[in-house]
Amino acid sequence: MKILVTGGAGYIGSFMSKRLLEREDEVIVVDSLERGYKEAVDPRTKLYVGNLLDREFISKIFSENKFDAVIHFAGYISMGESMENPYIYFQNNAFASLNVMEEMVKTKTNYLIFSSSAGVYGNPIKLPIQEDHPKNPENPYGESKLMVEKLMAWYQKTHGINSVALRYFNASGASLDGKLGENHNPESHIIPNIIKAILNKEKFKLYGTDYNTKDGTCVRDYIHVIDLVEAHVLALEKLIKDKGMFVYNVGTGNGYSNKEVVETVKRISGESFQVDEIARRPGDADTLIADASKIKAELGFDPKYSDLEMIVKTAWEWHKKLNIKK
């Protein structure tokens, strides 16, 4: 298949491209490189550098290539930043996605897989969270993802674009060989931020110890990036077989508190560091744990690398190598 990977110079997009190449798919990457890294793009892919808000740019990509599917990662991902600057989240996440779907209609590209988020649920009223749980985003980031899901549903009804929205629960970890990993700027995820604090010999800021959880810190469901990209492969196989707009949680059903993550990084790194407990960030939910039974039953999803030990170990090795290169 010939597949367009938007945001392919980013964290998950670079892993996805590598996995598709292993399947012997032809991969075209588009990325603005505003927050992605050219060196993360596999040289076997063709890279278009530009912004998906530019309709002429998107039209050029689709006119030069006949795609079988689009896997859409491109977007901003920081919940905290979205509270400070909601405009860029609605513009970059929602409008850019709308532009991609319009071009898919014009070129009769009928398979779309979208990088959604558990942020669409907000503070859950029931755990673990099932896909039919009420959607009450706590921040513009989550709202922007929900907006795209609604667009997908309408474009399936009106134009026959068959699609899957995968609601991620905390993508994490790095490749087993240490060659690919997470390097966001700004970085909002706890595991890389703890590791960066260690490597830079800085204090780690722990946001919020007054949540309604067992130890007062946020509880999250972590999914290893290798398992996460496999969910996209399964989603693509689903679309080839069945028409519709489908939604799946991608998680494990296990939750770890921020304090448990801190202790795991300490143990695996063998490093001690100072933790500063400060006020919570606006927009953070108490607990987000997936009910992953639907994706397991319907797609055969079986995460193999998503225990916290493996996630932290691979992330630690990746960031150590990245730090040496600097």
Image (tube, rainbow, N blue to C red):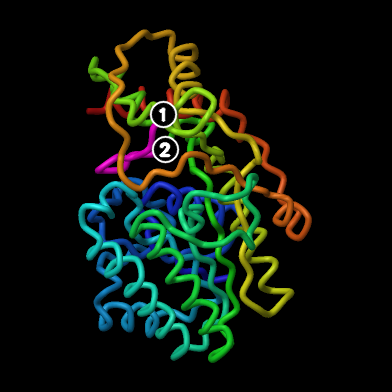
The image quarter containing residue 208 is: top left
Residue 1 shown left or right of residue 316 in the figure? right
**Dot 2 surroundings within 10 Å: few (below 14), some, or many (20 or more)?**
many
Q: Is residue 187 magenta?
A: yes
Q: Is residue 39 magenta?
A: no
| CB within 8 Å, label 2 to label 1 | yes
For the point 29% across and 22% down, the residue is 204
Question: Pointer 2: what residue?
Answer: 181
Task: Please tell me whether mark 2 sits on a helix, a strand or a loop.
Answer: loop
For the point 25% across and 43% down, the residue is 186
**Dot 1 surroundings within 10 Å: few (below 14), some, or many (20 or more)?**
many
Percent position of residue 122, x then y: 47, 53
- Which label's residue is closer to the chain start, 2 or 1? 2
Amino acid carrying label 2: it is Gly
Percent position of residue 119, x then y: 46, 53
Percent position of residue 241, x then y: 74, 74
Residue 102 shown left or right of residue 323 in the figure? right
Question: Pointer 1: what residue?
Answer: 318
Q: Which residues are magenta?
A: 181-191
